[in-house]
Amino acid sequence: MVYLGLGSNIGDRRSNIRQAVELIRERVGEIHKLSSLIETEPWGYDSSEKYINAVISLETTLTPLQLLQTTQQIERDMGRTTKSLDGIYADRIIDIDILIYNDLKINTPQLTVPHPQMYRRDFVMQPLKEIADSNNLFTIFQ
């Protein structure tokens, strides 16, 4: 099972999340669950714009790198022009993070899975715990 984190704090945030979910369904694979949408404060930087966050679980035939490339293309297609670099964050129309890819552990310059910051982010962990099988989470956190 693959878990993706979604966030938006520019424009119609709920609509942005819905659009991202639909594009993921079309381009990535079958979505099994979508968490509740939660509103959160920005993490790692100051902004007056709050986020809407969610997590989805899905099955895909894409490799982790193909999944990364596809989700980044979805971000660009939705209007995101810059990525966060070296911990410098900014407001964004959509952010799609690969949180978990089955039981793989990946650490390359392009991709780290499980997502290295997810354990520190309530806006990820709360919706993840809502939709993830507790046995699955136990294996992931080992």
Image (spheres, helix red, strand yellow):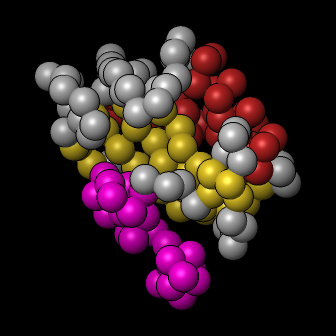
Viewer-nearest residue: 142 or 136? 142
In the drawing, does residue 114 fall left or right of residue 44? right
Q: Is residue 36 magenta?
A: no
Q: Residue furthest left?
A: 48
Query: Is residue 31 shown above or below 20?
Result: below
Could you say which quadrant of the image residue 9 lies in? top left
Q: Is residue 23 visible?
A: yes
Viewer-nearest residue: 62 or 33? 62
Q: Where in the figure is residue 93, as x and y percent of width and height?
A: 42, 21
Q: Where in the figure is residue 24, as x and y percent of width and height?
A: 65, 40
Q: Where in the figure is residue 1, as x and y percent of width and height?
A: 67, 67
Q: Is residue 56 visible?
A: no
In the drawing, does residue 64 fall left or right of residue 100? right
In the drawing, does residue 78 fall left or right of residue 84? right
Question: Which residues are drawn in magenta?
Answer: 118-142
Q: Is residue 132 magenta?
A: yes
In the drawing, does residue 4 fall left or right of residue 103? left
- The residue positioned 58% from the left and 25% from the top of the image is 75
- The residue positioned 76% from the left and 50% from the top of the image is 64
Q: Where in the figure is residue 46, as x and y percent of width and height?
A: 19, 26
Prevailing secondary structure class for the magenta stretch in the rendered image: helix
Query: Is residue 67 shown above or below 45?
Result: below
- The residue positioned 35% from the left and 22% from the top of the image is 90
